[in-house]
Image (spheres, rainbow, N blue to C red):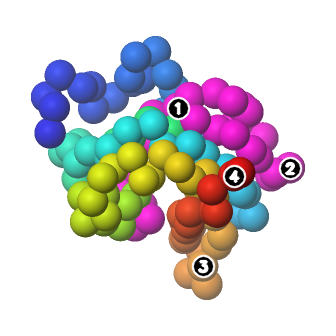
């Protein structure tokens, strides 16, 4: 963990990533390695992303803007856990990633993150 990064507020002047509504889909470019840090609400993952595509259910998200993600969502934890297992981290930057949100039966938000095929 880098203690110089703030737990609250924006990193380098970028806003935190807005919450996604049910049915939202965002294409993102991951800008760096995810980082674990402790907040008042427990362990979270922080990383920078750039939005390269959105659907109509993403009202608060701006296209081509860079955001700081700060979340305990399972998809970010899985990304953090697998990051160094892949080998060279540059392999992550060859993909656009699709982040989706849907409601579960108990009313919670389920976030899923998957890599899309590299663009040629």
Say which residue label 4 marks: 119
Q: Which residue is mark 1?
A: 67
Numbered disc 1: secondary structure: strand
**Mark 2 neighbour density, 10 Å: few (under 14) some (14–19) many (20 or more):** few
Residue 63 located within the stretch drawn in magenta: yes
Asked which secondary structure carries label 3, the reply is loop
Residue in the picture at 63% in, 62% down:
116
Mark nearest the camera among 1 and 4 is: 4
In the rendered view, does 96 fall on the left or right side of 120?
left
The segment highlighted magenta reads 50-75
Task: State the residue position of label 2.
Answer: 56
Residue at position x 64%, y 27% in the image: 65
Q: Residue 63's spot in the image, x, y percent?
A: 73, 33
Looking at marks 1 and 4 on the same chain, the residue that comes earlier in the sequence is marked by 1
Depth check: 99 or 84 in front?
A: 84
Residue 104 shows which numbered tag?
3
Mark pair 3, 1: CA separation? 26 Å
Task: Tell us which disc is closer to us: 4 or 3.
Answer: 4
- Is residue 73 rendered magenta in the image? yes
What's the CA distance linking mark 2 and mark 1? 19 Å
Residue 58 horizontal side relative to residue 5, left or right: right
Q: Is residue 20 above or below residue 52?
A: below
Residue count near mark 1 (Cα–Cα under 10 Å), binned few <14, some 14–19, many ≥20: many
């Amino acid at each position: 963990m880098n203690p110089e990064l703030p737990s609250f507020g924006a990193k380098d002047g970028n806003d935190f990533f807005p919450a996604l509504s049910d049915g939202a889909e965002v294409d993102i470019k991951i800008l760096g390695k995810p980082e674990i840090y402790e907040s008042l609400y427990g362990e979270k993952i922080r990383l920078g992303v750039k939005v390269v595509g959105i659907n109509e259910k993403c009202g608060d998200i701006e296209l081509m803007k860079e955001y700081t993600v700060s979340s305990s969502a399972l998809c970010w934890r899985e990304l953090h856990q697998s990051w160094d297992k892949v080998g060279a981290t540059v392999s992550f930057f060859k993909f656009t990633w699709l982040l989706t949100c849907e409601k579960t039966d108990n009313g919670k938000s389920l976030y899923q993150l998957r890599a899309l095929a590299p663009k040629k």
